[in-house]
Amino acid sequence: MAETVDEITISWTDDDGNETTKELGKKVLTKGAWATLVFKYQEMNRSTGEYGPVKFRIGRYQKRSGSYFPHSKFNISSEEQAKKIITILQDWMEE
């Protein structure tokens, strides 16, 4: 487990050493006992070995006993969905 926010990742490697989830970017929204991070990533299609479309994840992590543990996550499945979320948030902020 990660001891610092900077060590938190969503990159995953299978038993054969293949990177099944490739982290493309990470931004920290909050730090502390509860951390919130946003990730940009791709998942590998196991049957073709190709990486799929870019996705995004917002994750919350809780620090317990000196390490960060995942608490909750929300996956944004496409760039189109991400753009819709951005538009909604911008509209709300302008109200």
Image: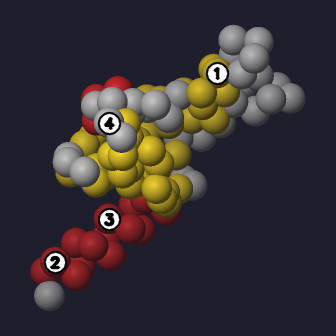
Question: What label sits on residue 46 in the rendered view?
Answer: none
- Residue at the spot 36% in from the left edge and 40% down from the top edge: 65
Which mark's residue is nearer the viewer, 2 or 1?
Answer: 1
Q: Nearer the viewer, residue 25 or 62?
A: 62
Q: Nearer the viewer, residue 76 or 9?
A: 9
Sequence-first disc among 2 and 1: 1
48 lies above or below 32: above
Mark 4 → mark 1, Cα distance in angstroms: 24 Å
Instruction: Tell which residue pokes out farthest to the top in this image.
Output: 17
Amino acid type of disc 1?
Thr
Marker count (numbered)? 4
Instruction: Give residue 19's position: percent from left, percent from top.
Output: 63, 20
Mark 2 → mark 3, Cα distance in angstroms: 11 Å
Is there a contact, CB below 8 Å, between mark 2 and mark 3? Answer: no
Which mark's residue is nearer the viewer, 2 or 4?
Answer: 4
Which mark's residue is nearer the viewer, 3 or 1?
Answer: 1
41 lies above or below 16: below
Sequence-first disc among 2 and 3: 3
Q: What SS does tag 2 mark?
A: helix
Does the image show residue 23?
yes
Mark 4 → mark 3, Cα distance in angstroms: 34 Å
**Which of the 4 quarters of the picture holds residue 44?**
top right
Mark 2 → mark 1, Cα distance in angstroms: 39 Å
Sequence-first disc among 4 and 3: 4
Q: What SS does tag 3 mark?
A: helix
Amino acid type of disc 3?
Ile
Question: What label sits on residue 93 in the rendered view?
Answer: 2
Residue wearing tag 3? 86
Residue wearing tag 1? 13
